[in-house]
């Protein structure tokens, strides 16, 4: 049995769909280890999202005679906690029995993957639910059914790559107040568990990044590859009282949103991996954003390292026309928003200098296009000296820092790409 739900929260009025997951899990009369909670991140470019476009599903095996009660409990909890007053909150919930779903695995798998990589309409989702007689309830315009069905699909088919996130929630009386965390213990938790956990802190930008700032009930989330190490980190952290916590299995940090493409085939609002040649030197525009252009024979596209990507911009600034790169990121306003970049080939960086005279002194320029002359011995030269300089970057893969990381972006600490050198940002 799988329960999927989405779109229960509000940017301004709080709540979080993962919190509802934690509440449902507690209400279901099964031992917690018989329920697998999934936290799925869907297409980050969907404009209706509240924050990170998350949807949740629970996979469990209830007694057959309990399924109707379970449906009732889950709908009631959703109705109690979803922020119906926010006009952008349109909850949806679906119930999928594994037996009933037996004939639709592949179709649902494609649906879920499209929810991460593409856009899906409410009508098409309702049609899917009807055609396959999937138990569901959509509230208001029912948009949440899209995420709910996609999340259920991932729980049904499993994930080909996954990580974990422990989400810790605040006591309701503290919601909306400033979060209280003992910062030193957060840094200690990171030191004790990295690289099995990541994105707890950002060392280069000296920032704690695992805790949100809004009115939602989340105190913090510890992301990682190993549940035991995540728990070790959790036990080190001292904070305001924790109401409850839950470890989700998730597609965060997997690059599931990325598909390989040629520039010509890339479409707005989807995320790509594109290989190309730098055609114009990086330029820094108003606001500190760094932009450069690549071409791949099919077309040209701008790539941006925006100001929030901080030190990542230093790498991008050092690119030069002729370099070969593979960029990763979403196409937004006809620009690739960089999440990662692989520098594959750097053309030699050459600068021109006044030539060195045989007598040991550096010559002076005589005038524009008139060559050089040694002031000490009078020797002349028509040509300047060509010197190769260090490009200041190396071939390898670079990523945006934790402060700017997208939920789905695979951290380099998880990338074992064999011979390719990686430079994880921490
Ligand atoms: P939070 O991260 O706090 O849980 P959120 O960012 O997940 O919030 P939602 O409130 O869930 O935002 O809103 C996202 C809405 O977009 C949902 O209704 C969901 O069903 C819908 N949606 C998700 N993926 C797609 C997609 N690929 N195409 C169209 N709609 C989508």
Image (cartoon, helix red, strand yellow):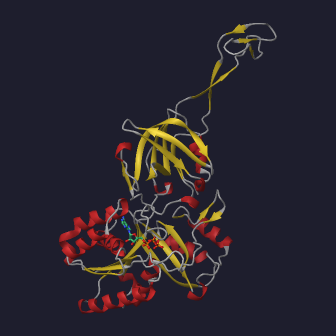
Say left or right for 42 vs 306.
Answer: left
Say left or right for 125 vs 295.
Answer: left
Is residue 399 positioned above or below 385 on the image? Answer: below
**How far across and down, in percent of the image, does residue 187 sit?**
64, 67
Say left or right for 219 vs 38.
Answer: right
In depth, the one of 395 and 321 nearer the eye is 321
> Which quadrant of the figure has residue 354?
top right
**How far across and down, in percent of the image, does residue 159 sit?**
34, 66
On-image quarter of the N terminus: bottom left
Is residue 31 positioned above or below 328 on the image? Answer: below
**How far across and down, in percent of the image, does residue 203 sit?**
64, 59
Seen at 37% across and 75% down, the residue is 144
> Which quadrant of the figure has residue 81?
bottom left
Asked whether residue 422 is in view, the answer is no
On-image quarter of the C terminus: bottom right
In depth, the one of 367 and 313 nearer the eye is 367
The image quadrant in which ligand 1 is located:
bottom left
Seen at 24% across and 89% down, the residue is 64
**How far across and down, in percent of the image, does residue 331 sit?**
43, 52
Q: How many marks?
A: 0
């Amino acid at each position: 049995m799988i329960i999927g739900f989405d779109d229960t929260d509000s940017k301004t009025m709080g709540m979080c769909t993962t919190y509802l997951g934690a509440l449902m899990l507690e209400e279901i009369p099964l031992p917690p280890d018989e329920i697998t909670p999934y936290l799925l991140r869907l297409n980050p470019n969907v404009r209706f999202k509240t924050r990170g476009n998350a949807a949740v599903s629970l996979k469990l095996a209830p007694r057959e005679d309990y399924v109707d009660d379970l449906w009732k409990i889950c709908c009631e909890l959703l109705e109690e906690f979803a922020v119906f007053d926010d006009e952008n909150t349109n909850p949806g919930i679906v119930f999928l029995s594994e037996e009933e779903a037996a004939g639709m695995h592949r179709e649902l798998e494609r649906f879920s993957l499209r929810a991460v990589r593409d856009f899906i309409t409410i009508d098409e989702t309702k049609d899917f639910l009807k055609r396959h007689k999937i138990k569901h309830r959509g509230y208001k315009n029912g948009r949440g059914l899209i995420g709910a069905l996609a999340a259920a699909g991932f729980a049904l088919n499993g994930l080909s790559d996954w990580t974990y996130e422990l989400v810790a929630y605040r006591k309701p009386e503290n919601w909306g107040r400033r979060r209280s965390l003992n910062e030193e213990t957060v840094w200690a938790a990171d030191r004790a568990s990295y690289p099995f956990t990541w994105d707890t802190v950002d060392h280069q930008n000296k920032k704690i990044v695992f805790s949100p700032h809004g009115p939602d009930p989340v105190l913090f989330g510890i992301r990682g590859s190993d549940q035991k190490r995540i728990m070790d980190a959790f036990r080190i952290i001292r904070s305001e009282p924790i109401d409850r916590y839950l470890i989700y299995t998730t597609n965060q940090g997997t690059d599931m949103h990325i598909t390989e493409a040629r520039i010509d085939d890339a479409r707005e609002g989807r995320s790509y991996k594109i290989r190309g040649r730098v055609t114009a030197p990086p330029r820094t525009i108003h606001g500190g954003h760094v932009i450069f252009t690549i071409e791949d024979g099919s077309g040209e596209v701008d790539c941006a390292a925006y100001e929030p990507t901080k030190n990542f911009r230093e790498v991008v600034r050092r690119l030069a026309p002729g370099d070969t790169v593979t960029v990763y990121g979403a196409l937004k306003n006809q620009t690739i928003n960089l999440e990662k970049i692989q520098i594959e080939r750097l053309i030699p960086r050459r600068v021109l200098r006044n030539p060195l005279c045989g007598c040991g002194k550096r010559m002076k320029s005589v005038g524009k296009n008139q060559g050089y002359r040694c002031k000490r011995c009078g020797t002349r030269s028509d040509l300047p000296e060509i010197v190769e300089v260090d490009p200041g970057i190396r071939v390898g893969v670079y990523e945006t820092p934790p402060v700017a990381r997208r939920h789905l972006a695979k951290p380099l600490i998880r990338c074992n790409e064999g011979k390719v050198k990686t430079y994880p940002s921490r």
